[in-house]
Image: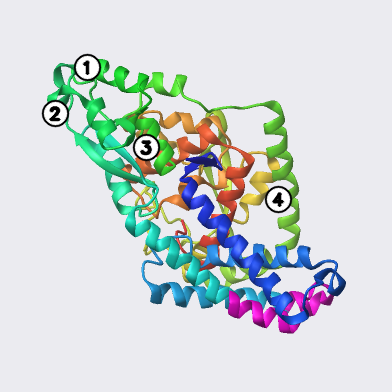
């Protein structure tokens, strides 16, 4: 497994994405060779830079068309359609760029040839990768000890995600592991070696009386990796499991690193980006304000008290997307996805997340950051802290315009949804970094462009 953006990915998947980038790069170079012959440098000294630009744009376009989500591209027809959409988008982008900056052109003939090569080579590359997945090549075999919710979550994720990099070879339930013994003949290690098991995942919800300590110690000393279930769950799914973790796990696990330098860099980035976006988006902000005023009675800006870092209250600002005094009769309630209190303009700006733009002022003031857990109301927090363990820990970082929970979990407005979102929020709080922030921003842009997951 390789750790990127504070999340673990199978090395096979990283090789696939990197290899596809190399395929795109070589497609352009081969097209240039076909068009102009041997000495590419005589033709264009900047060909390496221009080819790298094409590679980056094409891979971003592939990502935004869900071509790295194997649950979406699970058949060749869907793959072909999305591939043509992605390359079409990239072609339009370069058409505009080449018109504005002709110096970046790589040559009309080269570009056309490279598109044909791209389709052929990318499809071939992906067919090869699909065959590897279907045959389970390079999958790591694991044993899971446990049958509770934690174990079932791990098993289900591995079965649902074709490119997880794992296959569950054996499952031992709690009854099979009593009296310090798991497996046939009470020799779990022999079974693990016979089946070429690389990891044993201990996902027992109650370890006292069921944890096969002697067998696990023997397996560990014989070179088999032993992983605690909640740590493996975090690594595999990119979230925590708050129903299972305990204070000791949080205390001794890696993460929650905060430093003055990291805080300074995050704050500096927030200041620069908020100023630039407020200036650049001022026409859109003005247009939205006018449309809200024309659409329904009431103020343009909706302000509401929320809880921020360290439990400090502040007023969050949004464009009003509901009728005025929406909670006058109902009192504080979570907004639902098809809430009848939402106005016509409100439905559009919520879908595109334009209603969040006034929060740039909160970012500028230092009350919020671009990335972090979404700020919640004190009324709901008081309820959630009673029902959900570790809920208050999400307040150790600044709330954000967008967050790991927002880009990883669909719309929800219940206690169970709050628990699931906390799983993601605590993962972010534990593993926050500049690269993870960039990944969240990338996913947020994707959600805004395609109108998915708007809150």
Secondary structure of the residue carrying numbered label 1: loop
Tell me if label 2 and label 1 are in contact, CB under 8 Å: no
Report, in whole angstroms, how far the alpha carbon at label 4 lies from the one at label 2: 62 Å
Quarter of the view holding residue 379: top left
Report, in whole angstroms, how far the alpha carbon at label 4 lies from the one at label 3: 35 Å
Number of the label disc, if any, that sits on residue 274: 4
Magenta stretch: helix, strand or loop mostly: helix
| Viewer-nearest residue: 130 or 412 | 130
Of marks 1 and 3, which one's residue comes earlier in the chain?
1
Report, in whole angstroms, how far the alpha carbon at label 1 lies from the one at label 4: 52 Å
Of marks 2 and 1, which one's residue comes earlier in the chain?
2
Query: Which span is picked out in magenta?
Result: 96-117
Pointer 1: what residue? 208
Number of the label disc, if any, that sits on residue 184: 2
Pointer 3: what residue? 233
Report, in whole angstroms, how far the alpha carbon at label 2 lies from the one at label 3: 27 Å
Number of the label disc, if any, that sits on residue 328: none
Please indicate, yes or no, whether residue 440 appears anywhere in the rendered image: yes
Is residue 223 part of the magenta span, yes or no?
A: no
Q: Residue furthest front?
A: 38
**Few, some or many C-alpha atoms within 10 Å of disc 2 (few <14, some 14-19, many ≥20)?**
few
Which circle, 2 or 3, is nearer the viewer? 2
């Amino acid at each position: 497994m390789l750790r990127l953006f504070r999340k673990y990915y199978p090395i096979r998947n990283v090789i696939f994405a990197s290899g596809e980038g190399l395929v795109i790069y070589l497609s352009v170079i081969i097209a240039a060779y076909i068009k102009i012959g041997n000495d590419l440098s005589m033709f264009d000294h900047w060909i390496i830079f221009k080819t790298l630009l094409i590679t980056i744009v094409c891979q971003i376009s592939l990502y935004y068309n869900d071509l790295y989500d194997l649950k979406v591209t699970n058949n060749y027809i869907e793959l072909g359609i999305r591939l043509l959409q992605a390359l079409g988008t990239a072609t339009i982008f370069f058409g505009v760029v080449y018109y504005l900056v002709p110096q970046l052109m790589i040559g009309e003939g080269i570009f056309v040839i490279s598109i044909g090569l791209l389709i052929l080579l990318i499809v071939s590359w992906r067919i090869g990768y699909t065959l590897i997945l279907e045959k389970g090549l390079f999958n790591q075999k694991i044993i899971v000890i446990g049958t509770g919710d934690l174990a079932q979550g791990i098993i289900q994720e591995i079965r649902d995600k074709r490119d997880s990099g794992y296959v569950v070879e054996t499952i031992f339930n709690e009854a099979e592991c009593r009296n310090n013994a798991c497996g046939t003949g009470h020799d779990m290690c022999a079974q693990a070696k016979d089946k070429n098991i690389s990891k044993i995942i201990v996902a027992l919800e109650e370890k006292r009386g069921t944890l096969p300590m002697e067998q696990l110690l023997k397996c560990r000393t014989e070179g088999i990796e032993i992983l605690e279930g909640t740590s493996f769950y975090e690594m595999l799914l990119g979230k925590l499991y708050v129903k299972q973790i305990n204070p000791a796990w949080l205390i001794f696990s890696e993460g929650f690193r905060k430093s003055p330098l990291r805080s300074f860099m995050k704050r500096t980035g927030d200041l620069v980006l908020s100023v630039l976006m407020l200036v650049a988006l001022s026409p859109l902000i003005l247009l939205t304000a006018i449309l809200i005023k024309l659409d329904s009675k009431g103020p343009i800006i909706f302000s509401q008290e929320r809880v921020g870092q360290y439990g400090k209250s502040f007023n969050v600002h949004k464009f009003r997307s509901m009728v005025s005094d929406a909670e006058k009769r109902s009192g504080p309630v979570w907004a639902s996805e098809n809430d009848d209190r939402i106005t016509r303009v409100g439905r559009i700006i919520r879908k595109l997340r334009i209603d969040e733009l006034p929060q740039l002022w909160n970012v500028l003031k230092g009350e919020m950051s671009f990335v972090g857990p979404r700020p919640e109301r004190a009324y709901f927090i008081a309820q959630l802290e009673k029902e959900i363990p570790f809920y208050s820990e999400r307040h150790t970082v600044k709330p954000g315009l967008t967050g790991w929970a927002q880009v990883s979990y669909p719309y929800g407005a219940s206690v169970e949804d709050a628990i699931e979102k906390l799983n993601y929020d605590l993962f972010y709080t534990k593993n926050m970094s500049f690269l993870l922030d960039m990944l969240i921003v990338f996913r947020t842009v994707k959600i805004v462009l395609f109108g998915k997951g708007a809150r």
